[in-house]
Image (tube, grey):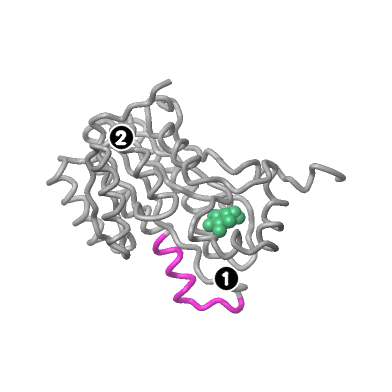
Amino acid sequence: MNIRLDKQRALVTGGNSGIGAAIALALAEAGAKVGVNYVSHPDLAQDIVNRIQAAHGEARSFRADVSQPDAVADMFASLDEVWGGIDILVNNAGIDGRRALAWEAAFPDWKRVIEVNLLGAFNCAQQALKRMAPQKSGVILSITSVHEIIAWSGYSAYTASKAGLSMMTRTLAQEAAPYGVRVLALAPGAIKTPINQAVWSDPQGLKDLLTKIPLNRIGTTEEIARMAVVLVSDAASYVTGRTIFADGGMTDYPGFAHGG
Ligand code: BGC
């Protein structure tokens, strides 16, 4: 199956690094026009735009802190000006925050994770739906994590944000379905990106991590990006209101491969 997204107008939040950058490149390769949102490191965003344009694709970078509703509204207004709207939103921007047990966590750190991961995704989804519902088409894909269902000591804000994003996805899918708009989520497991570099670059950390992954390897950003392209395309036209896991089996309770 050759998946094409020609003429589709896409926006990827946090599209300048890690999984977001890979998704931006993959959407463009499938023919979509791609908005690369970023909040810091404009050089990285420009690099993704340059790579897309070098391959004869269409791309633009858009700076906005997704946690700020006004900045998000401005970004969508810019998208309207440039491409006349949006067909695909990938809510990818996210942070995991400082590791801290709940009773040691600092309120501003906890709050910031929720603001970016959950409120940020809502702000963008709201703007996207305002446009997608009237045009009666569109897809919103939010990148969650295996930690929408796996507890993770030291990361209560992160797990709460991802679980919240999962349920928000299901509710928005219900609201948008009568308009032909799909809303779904993609939950990666351990993917080699800057967010978890401290773990995979440390031999002990990597060894421990691999015991949690039945396929016995860390995933690549391209593997997540390929899945994202499938999910936003018509190949997944009957899929909405759900999270699809791409995690090498991490959520398959690998501890039960023996004993029990
Ligand atoms: C986190 C990574 C982690 C992975 C699996 C992701 O959501 O961002 O740091 O390796 O989950 O635990």
Most extreme residue toward the right is 259
Q: Tell me residue 249's x, y (percent).
A: 65, 41
89 with respect to 99 (left or right): left
Q: Can you say whether 115 is above or below 124 in the image?
A: below
Q: Secondary structure at mark 2?
A: strand
Mark 1: which amino acid?
Arg
Q: Which residue is mark 2?
A: 138
Most extreme residue toward the top is 1
In-front residue for pair 2/107:
2
Q: Can you say whether 4 is above or below 57 in the image?
A: above
Q: Tell me residue 96's x, y (percent).
A: 50, 63
**Crowd rating for badge 1 (residues with CA inside 10 Å; few <14, some 14–19, many 20+):** some
Mark 2: which amino acid?
Gly
Q: Nearer the viewer, mark 1 or mark 2?
A: 1
Q: Secondary structure at mark 1?
A: loop
Which one is earlier in the sequence, the residue at label 1 or at label 2? 1
What residue range appears in magenta? 103-116
Q: Which residue is mark 1?
A: 99
Give how far apart the Cα atoms at labels 1 and 2 are: 36 Å
What residue appears at the point 26 percent right and 33 percent down from the top-left corner?
8
Q: Tell me residue 153's x, y (percent).
A: 64, 65
Most extreme residue toward the front is 54
What residue appears at the point 70 percent right and 63 percent down from the top-left corner?
204
